[in-house]
Amino acid sequence: MPFSSLKEKLSSVSHSTHFGEVVKINATVITATGLNVSISDMVKIISNYNGQETVGMVTEIDGNTFYITPFRFVEGFRAGDKVYLDSNGLNINVGEGLIGRVVNPFMQPIDGKGPIKNTQTAPIIKEPIPAMKRGMIDEVFSVGVKSIDGLLTCGKGQKLGIFAGSGVGKSTLMGMIVRGADAPVKVVALIGERGREVPEFIEKNLGGDLTNTVIIVATSDDSPLMRKYGAFSAMSVAEYFKDKGQDVLFIMDSVTRFAMAQREIGLALGEPPTSKGYPPSSLTLLPQLMERAGKEVGKGSITAFFTVLIEGDDMSDPIADQSRSILDGHIVLSRELTDFGIYPPIHILNSASRVMNDITSVEHIDAVMKFRRMYTLLKENEMLIRIGAYIKGTDKELDEAIEKKDSMENFLKQRADNQIPYEQSMQEILSIIK
């Protein structure tokens, strides 16, 4: 090995001779003493019995006793095992070498394509963009999905939520956005999902094409800490490219699994449960992640889509409610539209983009308002129309809506493998409302 490479490798390793000792272990928390630690310090636990190692984070301190939440499982460890402080802290390697790769939250490759090169160290936890350094969102960010580009137009640096129940089609919509988004770099975080869904998402939803894409994976069988910091790791990757002046697409599935991971950690540490068992830390953690996306003056932007799983299609779920208050828009997927065969099943009347009026033309906004009004009239009078109780000529606006019903529904439909340019979507909606 060249001397320079050996020197670099040795400099990255902690050589502390001070160590603490494990005094108690349960399924989710390791209790230890003997080290002067701070909250969020990284430590390494080494078994005296078989040399087995695991990494954890200090999450609570009580006098000389501190509590560690492990990144991996605790089987095989016992009281008396040694605890070492990791001087590197909570850092990961980020860089151009990640593009086209599938990695875990520590940026270790899981795709079998060998080691990752051309990287540099970056912290997982960073402050969000300061309020006065945020750039104005004044440019359209096209995602290639007609119903989003045309009716819920999003801008570069906007944060949106995709709210859906299980099996409604959010993974398919995610794939459409990743393939169709007008972004040079795309960062996808798959947090807390089934392991089966990872290769399925890559092959079926992305067509196996990882060009300009980085995928960070923390599956449901990973520890709560891996799931929690998987989201922060993915955001750090997106920030690396943003700081280089690039417009990044960040998409995460799902916020709910991320919050559930913090719920497991918080309850294990004795936090009081609130609505649906979520401790206060689960709700305070959401803005710490979401506010890191956005547009920064003098740099690039991170346009973020966060999926939120709505249990029982209940939009008053605490995580959904908190997410809506933080994000700059929400896209609601409807099970009813899925049953009617409309894909992607975006319920445009329940969805909104808070920056649309600032980035689109007056003509476009007027067209969208008329489209929504006609669609609302159809929904309100759907039963009367179906049973033949409505008499043509009673309401001119409703007559026009009935006449354009097929055109509007066709606009909302789109094949999963089809990407539509923004200009085409805009022209189509203008032609419908004329």
Image: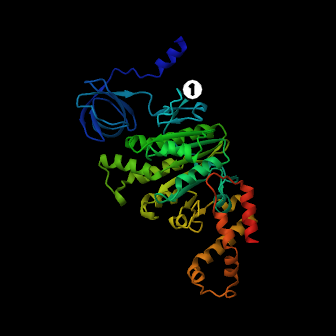
* Residue 434 in the image, given as x and y percentages of width and height: 76, 72
Foreground pick, 15 / 391: 391
Residue type highlighted by circle 1: Lys
Q: Badge 1 local density, few (<14 within 10 Å), some, or many (20+)? A: few
Q: Residue at x 55, y 48 (%)?
A: 251
Foreground pick, 204 / 29: 204
Residue 64: tell me if it is visible: no
* Residue 45 in the image, given as x and y percentages of width and height: 32, 29
Give the total of numbered labels: 1
The way the protein has been coloured in the rendering is rainbow
Residue 48 sits above or below residue 40 on the image: above
Residue 238: tell me if it is visible: yes
**Residue with the mark numbered 1:** 117
Location of residue 390 by image quarter: bottom right
* Residue 363 in the image, given as x and y percentages of width and height: 76, 66
Residue 234 sits above or below residue 141 on the image: above
Q: Residue at x 29, y 37 (%)?
A: 30
* Residue 185 in the image, given as x and y percentages of width and height: 63, 41
Foreground pick, 256 / 340: 340
Residue 419 sits above or below residue 314 on the image: above
> Which SS class for mark 1?
loop
Q: Residue at x 57, y 26 (%)?
A: 117
Location of residue 26 by image quarter: top left
Q: Residue at x 48, y 40 (%)?
A: 217
